[in-house]
Image (cartoon, rainbow, N blue to C red):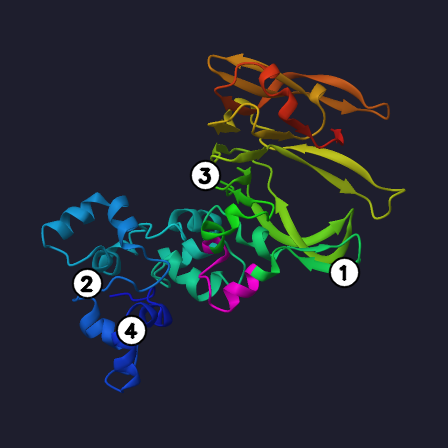
Amino acid sequence: MSFSVFNESFYLAHNPDVQAAVNAGNFASGLEHFQKFGLAEGRVNVSPFYDEQYYLRKNPDVGTAVTSGFLRSGLEHFILAGETEGRRASLLFDEQFYSRKNPDVAAAVTSGNLSSGLTHYLQFGQSENRSGTSFNEFAYSGITKLSPETLNLEKVNPDVEAAVQAGLFASTLEHYIKFGQFEDRGGGTFNGTTGNDTVVAFGQIDTLYGVDANIGPELRGATPTGGQALHLGFGVNEADVLFGGNGQDTFVLGQTITTGSFPSESYSIAVPFYQGNGDADYAWIRNYEIGKDEIVLAGAVWNYDFVQSGDNLNIYLSGVNVGNNSSLVRLENPDLVARVEGVISLNEIQYKLQFTGGQMV
């Protein structure tokens, strides 16, 4: 029986009678009480990473078993079987996403060295800046950037990172759910993996990437600044689904990479995502809100064709730049980059399109 999700301080804070019994020496710890009595008594507040109502709602078969008396709680099922079955127990952790994102963890679970990805996340992943869901925790509080004003490295939302380290929040995601999404913090970043993903945002101002995002040194051209940044994948052979929230969403479909160490030697290359496998890899943008949401494309508008397909607008990479004069050459077979649901013409989105610039090669 795995108790890896159990959090001692959380359990004691939600069960003051147990705290008093521990203080009186009747139990060595809250875990001892939980193992001997708490689980049988239906005490389910054991961790911020387990939500009884969420678990029962997401797993109606478990709910039926609890109602029928075969189980005392959803938590009992999660401890006995749900964790190893990869069932999601709260908004704060997604077992399936974590396994796709971290193949080393998935291999350890498969070999039996770990009971679940959640076990790894709680013991190691959080401190290693691994995100437990498509919400990028590092982008919310861990990134260090070079301030143009002071030329010092500054963290994004250092107060959030400090609050998590102090134990006030289980993760930066918990802060974002409770406070950050409603505050003027620049919004949340959501990203996928190197496989096929469904990325769902929920804040007031969010940025969505279907592609992978890994932590690496921040660069100015080819020169490290000493800070850390997110390095994005390319989305080749991926078919990702992007769901925006109710607020303003930015769907990112490409980037610009600057090469060279010095300004006089540097130049910018436009890198679209989902290029290379024709119509088989692309981002499907769902619930796009005309006039509110934005789409970011690599390069410039003349690199793309916008084609109506039923109730959708397909965005194709159709031209690249070649030669020193950067002349545009049309591709023989335009490459599908994105499908925007509920949009039928460029006119509906043209004022909400952003282009990164750079030379498309």
Q: Which residue is at 44% across, 61% downward? A: 170
CB under 8 Å between discs 3 and 2: no
Q: Quadrant of the C terminus?
A: top right
Residue 200 circle label: 3
Label 4 CA crowd tier, 10 Å (few <14, some 14–19, many 20+): few
Looking at this view, is 249 or 300 the one in front? Answer: 249
The question of residue 316 being in magenta is answered with no
Residue 42 circle label: 2
Whether residue 95 sits left or right of residue 266 in the image: it is left
Disc 3 secondary structure class = strand
For discs 3 and 2, the disc positioned in front in the rendered view: 2
Instruction: Give the Cα separation between the discs numbered 3 and 2.
Output: 32 Å
Q: Which residues are magenta?
A: 160-174
Residue 223 in the image, given as x and y percentages of width and height: 79, 52
Q: Which residue is mark 1?
A: 152
Number of labels in the image equals 4
Whether residue 57 sits left or right of residue 329 in the image: it is left
Instruction: Give the Cα separation between the discs numbered 3 and 1.
Output: 34 Å
Q: Residue furthest right?
A: 264
Dominant secondary structure (helix, strand or loop) of the stretch shown in magenta: helix
CB under 8 Å between discs 4 and 3: no
Three-letter amino acid code of the residue under disc 3? Val
CB under 8 Å between discs 1 and 4: no
Q: Which residue is at 80% across, 58% downward? A: 150
